[in-house]
Image: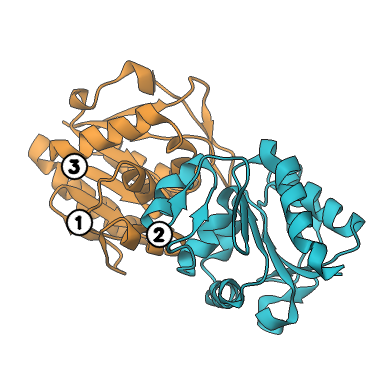
Chain colours: A cyan, B orange
């Protein structure tokens, strides 16, 4: 099964993390929660805590089969960290599955990983996505090679279906 | 004295709003707090509430002498509203003073108002600022004609000094 890196910080959007994470684990995949500090990170709406297994300084992109970036304000907090940005850049070059929803694309913008790609994301960052050289599509799920992106919580079921489908090759 | 529009929503950075607002009012300027809803908006760290005087649908850019956009996650929340974005675009074209700090530049990006301008902002949005066609400068205050921008709370004293200086012509 796939070993999935989850880049997460405080103020993550609870459902955009929780529902895909639950579905990935239920399908037998392993999640490794990675952040810039070892303390548990807190959700934006519920304050629910998620345990961090690894600091970004302790991991390499090539240790993982896939990368999942939940939304909320977690991506904004993570993109100020140069090691996180390098990790995302390395991962995007690897061609391995990369899943992001809502504000998740912000991390790929800072990593300059969206140029020429088809993606979607939350309305507030549409102009940032376009300015980063990507083609923005207003769809519940956008698949472009190894990238799967969605816009907001309502898209979660379609997002999960697409991600699990891409992870089938790891079964 | 100047009539200053303040575009503000929930999750504004408390000090980036509070300290400049206090200084502007102490200098005799009038603040009009504008948002997308009439309920008081809440600060990110302290939960302090700020009263909203006008809905964005009730105002025109030409009613004001200056525009102030505090940081935090308030700009991200405001930039999904098309009327707010139009207001910022109109204002930026007017040549009247436009002050923004931290994430404030996000609203100008969505309004496509940064092309060819020198600005600064919070580290998380540096790539967004560059991709929007602006020249990013890592300074406590950047002045470019009618634009005054700063990076984060530590820059507030220099930000206030520059803003008050630009507002002197309204005395």
- Tell me which numbered mark, 3 or 1, is placed earlier along the sequence: 3
Identify the chain of the residue marked 3, using the numbered disc in the image.
Answer: B
Look at mark 3 in the image and give the residue it sits on: B97
* Within-10-Å neighbours for mark 3: few <14, some 14–19, many 20+: many
Q: Nearer the viewer, residue B56 or A125?
A: A125
Identify the chain of the residue marked 1, using the numbered disc in the image.
Answer: B
- Horizontal side of residue A16 vs B9, given as left or right: right
- Horizontal side of residue A110 vs B164, given as left or right: right
Q: Which mark is residue B33?
A: none
Q: Which mark is residue A132?
A: 2
Q: Secondary structure at mark 1?
A: loop
Residue A60 appears in the figure = no
Look at mark 1 in the image and give the residue it sits on: B117
**In this picture, is B94 found above or below A148?**
above
* Within-10-Å neighbours for mark 1: few <14, some 14–19, many 20+: some
Label 3, label 2: how many angstroms apart (C-alpha)? 28 Å
- Horizontal side of residue B24 vs A169, given as left or right: left
Q: Nearer the viewer, mark 1 or mark 2?
A: 2
Identify the chain of the residue marked 2, using the numbered disc in the image.
Answer: A
- Horizontal side of residue A156 vs B105, given as left or right: right
Image quarter of residue B27: top left
Q: Position of residue B20 (x, y in %)?
A: 34, 45
**In this picture, is B88 found above or below A17?**
above
Quadrant including the C terminus of chain B: top left
């Amino acid at each position: 099964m796939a070993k999935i890196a989850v880049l997460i910080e405080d103020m993550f959007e609870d459902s955009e993390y929780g529902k895909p994470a639950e579905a990935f684990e239920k399908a037998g995949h392993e999640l490794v929660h990675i952040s810039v500090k070892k303390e548990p990170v807190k959700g934006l709406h519920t304050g629910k805590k998620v345990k961090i297994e690894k600091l970004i300084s302790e991991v390499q992109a090539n240790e993982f089969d896939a990368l999942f970036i939940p939304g909320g304000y977690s991506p904004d907090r993570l993109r100020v960290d140069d090691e996180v940005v390098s990790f995302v850049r390395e991962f995007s070059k690897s061609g391995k599955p990369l899943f992001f929803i809502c504000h998740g694309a912000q991390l790929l913008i800072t990593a300059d990983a969206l140029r020429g790609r088809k993606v979607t994301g939350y309305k507030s960052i549409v102009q940032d996505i376009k300015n980063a050289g990507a083609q923005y599509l207003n769809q519940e799920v956008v698949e472009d090679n190894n990238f799967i992106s969605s816009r907001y919580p309502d898209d979660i079921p379609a997002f999960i279906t697409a991600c699990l489908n891409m992870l089938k090759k790891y079964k």
